[in-house]
Amino acid sequence: MRKVILFIAMSLDGFIADTNGRVDWLAGQQPNEDDMCTYKEFIKGIDSVVMGWKTYHQIVTELSSEEWFYKNLNSFVITHHDIISNEKITAVHGDVCAFKESLKKKTGKDIWICGGADVVCQLMKQQLIDRYHLSVIPTILGDGVRLFSKVEEPHKLKLIKTESYNGIVDVIYEKR
């Protein structure tokens, strides 16, 4: 069965964006090094990407305004905003957990949850994330958009793998 994988970068102190929502600090310790090495392997097992409105909006307005960055994936945006679905992007209105369950039942590769914190929080409340692939960036922000909010019960995980490159540490956990 398809896995739902949170693959996301965060600061050492657990933030996915600064207080202004910016992610320009997402890099390793050497500016010209390749920070995408684990992403390149990860994406081979993915055919669907799910994100919230803020992540989508940041991609299309700041990070890749000329071309949809995930053109080779089935892209789904969880939103209450009126965005028009097209051949590359499907707007999903309603419960992210119910949508995730219906998507997981379809045939295909794994499903990537790429952001944001609101989508992650909703899926975590229902314990619907199968794998956590966290890239810890060597930066302490002190404040910003926290990846994990308060949970009602502990989420016990099992360490699958660690890897480091350019000062970034990837940790991969699965549910126990």
Image (cartoon, helix red, strand yellow):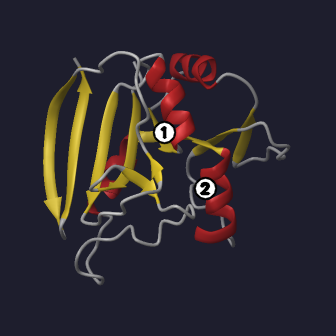
- The location of residue 42, given as percent across then percent down, is 33, 48
Residue 167 to residue 75: above or below: below
Labels 2, 1: front one: 1
**Is residue 64 at all visible to an observer of this figure?**
no
Any mark on residue 85, and which? none
Label 2 crowding class (10 Å Cα cut-off): few <14, some 14-19, many 20+?
few
- The location of residue 130, given as percent across then percent down, is 35, 25
Identify the mark nearer the N-term, 2 or 1: 2
Judge by depth and name the residue closer to the eye, 70 or 50. Answer: 50
On screen, residue 170 versus residue 88, left or right, reads left
Judge by depth and name the residue closer to the eye, 28 or 146. Answer: 146
Quarter of the image with the C terminus in it: top left
- The location of residue 67, given as percent across then percent down, is 66, 68
Q: Residue furthest bottom?
A: 32
Total marks placed: 2
Q: What secondary structure is marked by label 1?
A: strand
Tell me where residue 151 sits by quadrant: top left
Q: Which residue is mark 1?
A: 113
- The location of residue 71, given as percent across then percent down, is 60, 55
Residue beneath the point at 69% across and 73% down = 66
Amino acid at circle 1: Ile
Any mark on residue 71, and which? 2
Residue beneath the point at 23% across and 39% down = 172
